[in-house]
Image (cartoon, grey):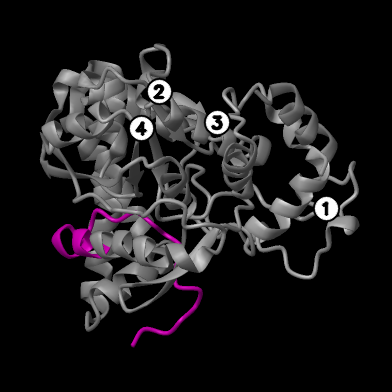
Amino acid sequence: MSVKEKLKRVLIEDLNLEDVEPEEITDDMALFGEGLGLDSLDAVELVIIVQKHFGVEIKDMVESRPIFESINTLAAYIEANLS
Amino acid sequence: MSENKVDTSSAVEQRWTSRSLGSFWQHQSFYLLIRCGGQQAAYLLLYCVVFYYTLLPSIRRKCSYYLSRRFHHAGWWQRFWNSYQMNLALGKVLVDRALVGILGAERIEVKFHGKQELMDLIAEGNGVILVNAHIGCWQVAASVLDFVETPINLLMQREEGDIDRHHFEHSGSECPYRIIDPRGHLGGVLEMLEVLKRGEVLSVMGDRMLGHDKNGVDVNFMGGTVTFPFSAYKLASATGAPIVALLSYKVGRNSYAIKISRMIKVPGNLGRGKEKFIPYVQEYATILENFCDEHPFQFFNFFDMWQNESVD
């Protein structure tokens, strides 16, 4: 399973996104606001999910802002930091 | 004089504004009096200004949202007097805040109850969340937090065009705290998470919803339902940072006190649902209600927190 596929699956499970299937989440869909519809506090959950399921720690939150834009950007960060 | 009047243009998202009620020249008059005659001179003008404002029905109405719940059976004169007391308490706090900035922090004595407990919490290295409220004067109180070597970060929203000055602005010095703007990217959540991961202190207001923040839960407060933010509790759950309420209050003409509450223990990994955080926000609301019992005129929320519920 690719990082993107796993990411979509764990987002749905851990964030309890009801009535959303992995294939409905496009790679360039915005995670916050319009798009997937996450709110600001879900960013906390995203940080935890990335660490819990991929073992990747997001160290500099402020510098890492762009990675929270979409599945594409988040998956790219995870792939670049997988040990 | 500063107050928190209802902003009808965006009442759905935010029912208050912290913009000052007084004009630029009214503020300058107080600052000049403080420079020339100190606290006493400024207080003399304050008594007159507050009396004038209390005569205005619109001002008394803004006091009444809280006062009618705190003093259920007050008659007309008592309500007028209570409004005067509440406005005067706020005015004194604002004068004292300017006094600290203009003439120096040594003009006000501040006693800190729980200093060692706070130091112990910081030493644990998980960061500490201080939940503040619009009570007493956190800025005067914070002027004695210089013993805390760990950086202090404030989640603070400043109104556009607000002419009211913070204490450090009077002396032209740099802000002693790092300000996190809730109108920033993702409501400043990533910055808040970052400072807690670094083991720093994060101070947030626990009694008002900021801007377009929808992260609030309904809790019981003074016999009604209010919406308080739960972001701090979510961050505590995610990071393991302890939460304590920071309570500041004026105890004498030149003296304030700060105390920290018992720790609010938020379990780890509570997850996404807002309802899971209600017990901890309720714990804070109860702490705040107890504060209002002890210091009835030092609660400075001049808007309808109870969303038009009738008083029982």
Mark 4 vs 2, N-terminal side: 4
* Magenta-drawn segment: B289-312
Pointer 1: what residue?
A: A34
- Name the secondary structure under disc 3: helix
Q: Mark 2 — residue?
A: B177
For badge 3, the amino acid type reads: Glu
Q: Nearer the viewer, residue B226 or B93?
A: B226
**Residue of label 3:** B191
Q: Quadrant of the C terminus of chain A?
A: top right
Looking at the picture, do discs 1 and 3 lie on one chain? no
Amino acid at the residue labelled 4: Gly
Q: Chain of mark 2?
A: B
Q: Amino acid at mark 2?
A: Tyr
Pinpoint the chain carrying mark 1.
Answer: A
The residue marked by circle 4 belongs to what chain? B
- Whether residue B87 is visible here, answered yes or no, is yes
- Do the residues bearing badges 2 and 3 touch, measured as CB atoms within 8 Å? no
Mark 3 and mark 4 in contact? Answer it, CB < 8 Å: no
